[in-house]
Amino acid sequence: MSSEHEVAVVERGSFAIAHCTCGWSAPARRSRDLSRRDAEAHGSEDGGPETPDAGNRA
Ligand SMILES: [Zn+2]
Protein backbone atom coordinates (compact mmCIF):
# COMPACT_ATOMS: atom_id res chain seq x y z
CA MET A 1 0.00 0.00 0.00
CA SER A 2 2.37 2.70 -1.07
CA SER A 3 0.65 4.05 -4.13
CA GLU A 4 -0.86 7.30 -3.05
CA HIS A 5 -2.95 9.25 -5.44
CA GLU A 6 -3.41 12.80 -4.38
CA VAL A 7 -5.54 14.51 -6.94
CA ALA A 8 -5.94 18.26 -6.99
CA VAL A 9 -8.30 20.18 -9.19
CA VAL A 10 -6.71 23.22 -10.78
CA GLU A 11 -8.84 25.93 -12.28
CA ARG A 12 -7.74 27.56 -15.49
CA GLY A 13 -10.03 30.34 -16.49
CA SER A 14 -13.42 28.72 -16.89
CA PHE A 15 -11.90 25.27 -17.11
CA ALA A 16 -10.88 22.82 -14.44
CA ILE A 17 -8.23 20.13 -14.68
CA ALA A 18 -7.55 17.35 -12.23
CA HIS A 19 -3.90 16.57 -11.57
CA CYS A 20 -2.49 13.68 -9.57
CA THR A 21 0.79 13.27 -7.75
CA CYS A 22 1.48 10.15 -9.81
CA GLY A 23 1.71 12.22 -12.94
CA TRP A 24 -1.78 11.56 -14.21
CA SER A 25 -3.92 14.43 -15.31
CA ALA A 26 -7.41 14.64 -16.70
CA PRO A 27 -8.48 16.62 -19.72
CA ALA A 28 -9.74 20.14 -19.15
CA ARG A 29 -13.36 20.22 -18.13
CA ARG A 30 -15.80 23.03 -18.34
CA SER A 31 -17.08 22.32 -14.87
CA ARG A 32 -15.21 21.70 -11.67
CA ASP A 33 -17.74 19.01 -10.86
CA LEU A 34 -16.63 16.97 -13.84
CA SER A 35 -13.01 17.36 -12.82
CA ARG A 36 -13.89 16.11 -9.38
CA ARG A 37 -15.46 13.09 -10.98
CA ASP A 38 -12.30 12.52 -12.96
CA ALA A 39 -10.32 12.74 -9.76
CA GLU A 40 -12.57 10.29 -7.95
CA ALA A 41 -12.55 7.88 -10.85
CA HIS A 42 -8.77 7.97 -10.97
CA GLY A 43 -8.43 7.54 -7.22
CA SER A 44 -10.64 4.46 -7.14
CA GLU A 45 -9.36 2.97 -10.36
CA ASP A 46 -5.83 2.08 -9.48
CA GLY A 47 -4.09 2.98 -12.65
CA GLY A 48 -5.31 4.00 -16.04
CA PRO A 49 -4.07 3.40 -19.56
CA GLU A 50 -1.51 6.18 -19.15
CA THR A 51 0.00 5.43 -15.78
CA PRO A 52 3.79 5.60 -15.53
CA ASP A 53 4.12 3.48 -12.39
CA ALA A 54 3.10 0.08 -13.73
CA GLY A 55 5.87 -1.92 -12.10
CA ASN A 56 5.25 -1.18 -8.45
CA ARG A 57 3.59 -4.36 -7.25
CA ALA A 58 5.02 -6.36 -4.39
ZN1 LIG B 1 -2.70 8.99 -9.49
Image (cartoon, rainbow, N blue to C red):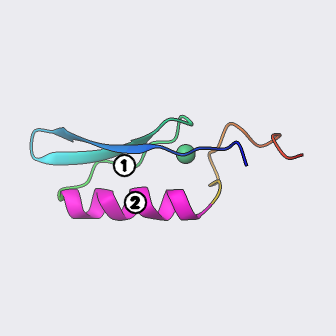
Identify which residue is drawn at 83% across, 40% down: 55
Dots 2, 1 in contact, CB < 8 A: yes
| Mark 2 element type | helix
Question: Which percent across, then down, holds residue 12?
Answer: 17, 37
Seen from the viewer's position, the closer of residues 28 and 37 is 37
Q: For mark 1, what is the residue?
A: 27
Label 1 crowd bin: few (<14), some (14–19), many (20+), radius 10 Å: few
Identify which residue is drawn at 66% across, 44% down: 3
- Quadrant field for ligand 1: top right
| Sequence-wise first label, 2 or 1 | 1
Principal SS element in the magenta part? Answer: helix
Identify which residue is drawn at 60% across, 63% down: 45
Q: Quadrant of residue 22?
A: top right
Question: Which percent across, then down, holds residue 2?
Answer: 70, 42
Q: Amino acid at mark 1?
A: Pro
Q: Is mark 1 within 8 Å of ligand 1?
A: no
Identify which residue is drawn at 40% across, 59% down: 38
Label 2 crowd bin: few (<14), some (14–19), many (20+), radius 10 Å: many
The question of residue 43 being in magenta is answered with yes
Question: Which percent across, then down, holds residue 39?
Answer: 41, 56
Q: Is mark 2 within 8 Å of ligand 1?
A: no
Q: Residue furthest left?
A: 14
Q: For this view, does 5 lie left or right of residue 30?
A: right
| Mark 1 element type | loop
Q: Residue furthest front?
A: 1
Q: Amino acid at mark 2?
A: Asp
Q: For this view, does 48 lie left or right of residue 57?
A: left
Q: Which residues are magenta?
A: 32-45
Q: Which is in the foreground here, disc 2 or disc 1? A: 2
Where residue 38 is drawn, which disc sits there? 2
